[in-house]
Image (cartoon, grey):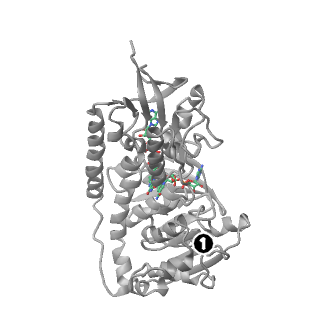
Amino acid sequence: MPESSHVDLCLIGSGSANSIPDDRFDDWSIALVEGGTFGGTCLNVGCIPTKMYVHPADLARTPEHAGPLGVDLTLDRVRWADVRDRVFGRIDPISAAGERYRAESRNIRLFRQQARFVGDARLRLDDGTEITADRFVIAAGSRVRIASADGLADTPYETSDTVMRLPELPRSMIIVGGGYVAAEFAHVFSAYGTEVTLVARGKALLRQEDAEISSRFTEAMGRRVDLRLQHTLRATRRAERGVEVDVDGPDGPATLTADVLLLATGRIPNGDRLDLDRTGVTLDDDGYVVVDEHQQTGHPGIFALGDVSSHHQLKHVANHEARVVQHNLLHPDAMIASDHRYVPHAVFSSPQVASVGLTEEQAFEQGIGYVVGQTAYASTAYGWALGETGEHVVKLLADPATGLLLGAHLIGPDASSLIQPLIQAMSFGQAAPDVARGQYWIHPAMAEVVENALLALPLDGRSAE
Ligand SMILES: Cc1cc2nc3c(=O)[nH]c(=O)nc-3n(C[C@H](O)[C@H](O)[C@H](O)COP(=O)(O)OP(=O)(O)OC[C@H]3O[C@@H](n4cnc5c(N)ncnc54)[C@H](O)[C@@H]3O)c2cc1C
Ligand SMILES: NC(=O)c1ccc[n+]([C@@H]2O[C@H](COP(=O)([O-])OP(=O)(O)OC[C@H]3O[C@@H](n4cnc5c(N)ncnc54)[C@H](O)[C@@H]3O)[C@@H](O)[C@H]2O)c1
């Protein structure tokens, strides 16, 4: 007969929720339910392995960047199997050790199954085990969205879940999508030597970015891959070697062939697979669990965090929300709110892109007054050292009345790190002139491009005070 148990806390998902139980929860009885690979998306198939593929890709492009500076280098080859085995030789043991640690813990019981709600605060696992709990945390993440195309069911294809474990480096690859995943893998595989065709239905790549950044990125990627913008996927089929893909573009239909097809067409939150209506938890129109500022769902004592409830679908957001939920579980009478005011993101492609706050288009559409300050990497001393030619920029938007930053958008080397003082300025309400002149900027570091963009804002030295 299937067992049933009652616990103080039930966590659904071992990604970000796994960081919640620390020694303050030692006297809580906890159930941790995980139906997939222990550790979730970021560790196993997301942020961490992808960036471990991006760094070797950056290295593989060194000869391209060194030549114009007078250093002739050649790339012999990328040893795919060694790259892959380094990545998963590092990650798989971390996942296994994390699982072992939880499985052996005194007060936490690990259930390695899929779960669904079958009643009010009542969860059923695949083997029939039922768990009731005083509090639940739904941290079930998201899954790959598969684009539809005739014949896809009979065509071999990869997604971000599988492509990093390919047995060998493909000679050619068709990537469908124009967002984060497509941008990062187009960089990785083209740098490794794969012939990449990138099929995107929009007029540009990374269309959620500020239009100027998206357009600069599209232009740069267009020089590296066979870029098919405004193309839709119609049909796919298995070919003698690899796949054939029929697409429709502005010049009519075309058939593309490649060894491998990679679908990078977004992610769907997993709330739809939990029968949440049985426990009074609602989903919004896009399928995300609805939570309040305390990360609490409509059902008191049931919290949600991360990709299952956050439109951002970013690990640093899931981590922040996990800290908020952790506090609110421990201090139900003094709950704290999540801070989603200035959520940054970066695309680890080449060039890198990083952004926080409003794009110029959003500021315009929302009728918010703004001024723009923009500086090219090429105009700073370290930009000269790098041989920058003007395509990489820092673009800032600020409120002309207060000098407070409204948005920051970077494209170029180390954009994901260079943006941090701008995230800090926005988070702590520091006005642009104060950030520019209230501290030293190391000369001649690349960060001077940020200083110069702050100084380029037409603000007459205005500060928030
Ligand atoms: C290729 C890729 C690259 C990425 N790169 C970055 C990046 O560079 N930076 C960044 O900030 N973000 C990145 N992300 C996004 C980031 O990985 C996610 O935002 C983050 O991992 C979400 O964490 P989570 O805890 O919400 O969900 P997850 O880590 O996905 O955890 C959810 C867990 O719940 C389990 N589960 C789901 N349903 C059930 C069920 N019914 N029963 C039992 N268990 C269940 C799943 O198996 C999973 O292990 C990337 C994502 C991808 C796909
Ligand atoms: N560096 C990072 O932080 C990072 C990296 C990778 C992934 N992620 C996270 O993972 C999520 C998923 O990434 P993603 O790139 O898959 O999603 P995305 O939402 O960034 O991009 C999806 C792309 O697929 C296209 N698309 C959707 N349906 C399509 C269809 N039927 N036919 C053709 N094209 C279609 C969209 O137009 C878009 O260009 C991101 O939203 C992001 O939150 C983050």
Does 231 appear above or below 291? Answer: below
- Residue at the (38%, 41%) spot, across then down: 18
Q: From this viewpoint, is residue 158 visible?
A: no
Secondary structure beneath disc 1? loop
The spot of residue 289 in percent (x, y) is: 57, 39
The amino acid sitting under disc 1 is Leu
* Furthest-right residue in this view: 367
- Residue at the (62%, 74%) spot, across then down: 398
Does 290 appear above or below 62? Answer: above
In the rendered view of the protein, which quadrant contains the C terminus?
bottom right
Of 462 and 146, the residue lying toward us: 462
* Residue 129 lies in quadrant: top left
Of 77 and 139, the residue lying toward us: 139
The spot of residue 109 in percent (x, y) is: 33, 29
* Furthest-top residue in this view: 1
- Residue at the (55%, 61%) spot, across then down: 342
Q: Is 231 displayed left or right of 238 in the figure?
A: right
- Residue at the (36%, 37%) spot, across then down: 25
Q: Is 318 displayed left or right of 96 in the figure?
A: right
* Residue 209 lies in quadrant: bottom right
The spot of residue 433 in percent (x, y) is: 55, 80
Badge 1: few (under 14), some or many (20 or more) residues near its Cα, within 10 Å?
A: many
* Furthest-front residue in this view: 333
